[in-house]
Image: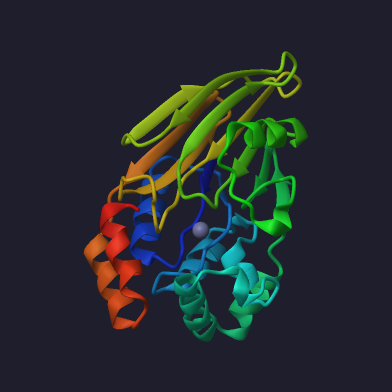
Amino acid sequence: MRYAVFSDVHGNLEALTAVLEALGNEKVDRYLCLGDVVGYGADPSSCLCRLQEREAVIVGGNHEMGCIGKLTLEWFNPMARAALLWTRDQLSFTDLDALRRFPLTTTEGPCTLVHGTLRHPERFDYLVDLAAIIDILRLCQSLFCLVGHTHVPCIVEYDRLHDRLLRVLLARDELTEVGFVNDPHRMRYLLNPGSVGQPRDGNPLASCAIIDLENQRLSIRRVPYDVARAQQKIRQAGLPEFLAARLEIGR
Ligand code: ZN
């Protein structure tokens, strides 16, 4: 079984297309998406459609919750708010209905999926410090805890039986690959696949991950895509200029 794991597509169809093509070459069995399919980018509806075609398992992110009114506009900064109002106008009733059905957490095989944190999925806190990450890994009932939201890819390996943090890896390189121990009684892995459509770790390449159960390998890949085209569409849509500019620096 091979799971494709990705997050924070943010309406960037060029990045999503490149990532799905790269993942397609890896003979993936199941697509797991950690939320924020929409928001910021110029193609929210098409991105949603691409994921539905692949029957992706999707949990809701803060941008989905904003679109369907489950998070208030005050939650968002002014730029995100402007993008959210624009995005909501682009979505059909069917699209909005699909967003309403996204759960905040779900499990799929050995994976628990959430956009922000398992402790308070509805608050969309940013999981950035190690104490909070360990707290989440203690809480998680499955081998893998898959999170998004920060747009920064990383892998954390934790031995819950001996309360030992074994490894923290950031994944700026083109390929970061590690083995894992398939022992859900002892081990926990936090995997943040980074962001498909708006990376913020200083590397502008789209980011995604693969969990290969058979070979017990976990990898994060960076995929080049047509950044100029995605920027052009954002500008043409009249979305805030910063949303276009940041794509080329990955911040
Ligand atoms: Zn996001």
Q: What's the colour scheme?
A: rainbow
Q: Residue at x 47, y 79 (%)?
A: 82
Q: Is residue 188 visible?
A: yes
Q: Residue at x 71, y 53 (%)?
A: 121
Residue 204 placement, left or right of 121: left
User: Which quadrant of the figure contains the N terminus?
Assistant: top right
Instruction: Check the image and name the residue furthest to the top.
Output: 162
Q: Nearer the viewer, residue 24 or 174?
A: 174
Residue 96: % across, % down: 63, 78
Picture layout, residue 231 above or below residue 251:
below
Q: Residue at x 61, y 61 (%)?
A: 61
Picture layout, residue 16 above or below residue 231:
above
Residue 37 placement, left or right of 232: right
Q: Nearer the viewer, residue 26 or 17?
A: 17
Q: Quadrant of residue 133?
A: top right
Q: Quadrant of residue 201?
A: top left
Residue 60: % across, % down: 64, 61
Residue 196: % across, % down: 42, 54
Q: Residue at x 61, y 74 (%)?
A: 74
Q: Quadrant of residue 234?
A: bottom left
Query: Could you tell me how many numbered marks the image carries?
Result: 0
Q: Is residue 141 visible?
A: no
Residue 149: % across, % down: 54, 52
Picture layout, residue 232 above or below residue 37:
below
